[in-house]
Amino acid sequence: MDAGICLGDIQGSNYAENDGSWYSMTLKWSQKPFYTAIGNHDGGNSDKQDISGTKQQVFDKLIRPNLKCMCLPTLEKTYYAVNFDAYQITLIVLDDYMVPDDRDENGDFKITRAVECMNQEQLDWLVATLESVPKDYHVLIARHAYPDSGKILKCDWTQANITGFGGGMPLTYGKSEMVPDIINAWVNGVALHKDYAPIANADLLPTLRVRADFSTRGKGVFIAYLTGHNHVDFLGTSGKYPDQNVVAFPSSANDNWDNLGCDLPRERNTKAEDCLTVLAVDRESRIFHLVRVGSNFTKSLVNRTYRSISY
């Protein structure tokens, strides 16, 4: 394997749960470059100051100590891009929780840290990053949340009781999110000029504006979104753009919530305690492969070992 990706919820409950040192140690043990997407629990599932963190605090706790492991020594943001030049693949890591750090008179945050929220700086960065992706490179996006309302692909890889994209977190700019619109414009090599007004916390959040024109660059190739959030396995697509693949992964955590939500038996101090999924991309055939390592038999004894998906 060339690298690892963690799709968020490093903190099992909230930002103040621990100091994050266990996570840094785990990444060092891997002896691989390891890339982290921030989850809703990582900043705190709350607006309370004592259990929640600012964007800078989250970066300093969960990403800054691991910059050497990430081979990104000058990184200052919770979102970033990495080129795998040997395979002509670009990995873009997004932060779905760019909630403003504004506080009220009590010192608590005005907006709950777990609200799914883009900001203008990250959107502008995403457009510029996609513009700069070499023309023959294919793109993966790693993020904690799902791109929009989405559609589930029913198959042995998808958990049987999953009926739709979920997670229960409010979407401040609506379910028809701006990232799938940007990816669609990039894939088709066209312009996108669109405004996105907040549908929640409208008095605290600005209208976001996408001003992109990929016509000079030309068409791009998008592989998939890699997501966490529900801590279960499923395959699907964007609800608005069926050509945009979505792959959801189970959490690496092992607590009661994960065991209740996931159809994989996860028992501490047994072979089923942990699992990972290996993603392999075949650019020439435009297929990506998923291979489960560890905890591959579901509670109903379905063997979730291998799946290939066209893109």
Image (cartoon, rainbow, N blue to C red):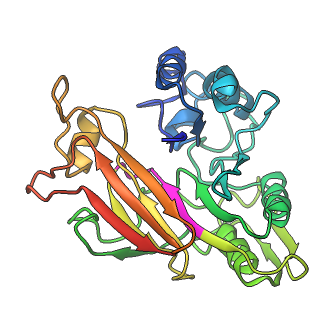
Give the number of marks: 0
User: Quick one: which residue is furthest to the right in this view?
Assistant: 216
Q: Is residue 148 above or below residue 119?
A: below
Observer able to see residue 44: no
Q: Residue 208 versus residue 278: which sits nearer the camera?
A: 278
Can you give x and y, in whole percent of width and height, for residue 203 in the image? 77, 57
In the image, taking residue 128 as reference, residue 251 lies left or right, namely left
- Asked if the stretch drawn in magenta spans residue 219, the answer is no
Can you give x and y, in whole percent of width and height, for residue 254 in the image? 29, 32
In the image, taking residue 105 as reference, residue 132 lies left or right, namely right
Can you give x and y, in whole percent of width and height, for residue 49 in the image? 62, 26
| Residue ID at (30%, 40%) | 275
Q: Is residue 82 above or below residue 24?
A: below
Can you give x and y, in whole percent of width and height, for residue 107 in the image? 70, 26
| Residue ID at (20%, 66%) | 160
Q: Residue 72 versus residue 32: which sits nearer the camera?
A: 32
Which segment is the magenta one?
223-231
| Residue ID at (78%, 53%) | 122
Observer able to see residue 171: yes
| Residue ID at (23%, 35%) | 256
Quarter of the rendering containing residue 223: bottom right
Q: Residue 45 versus residue 249: which sits nearer the camera?
A: 249
- Asked if the stretch drawn in magenta spans residue 225, the answer is yes
Q: Is residue 178 above or below residue 302?
A: below
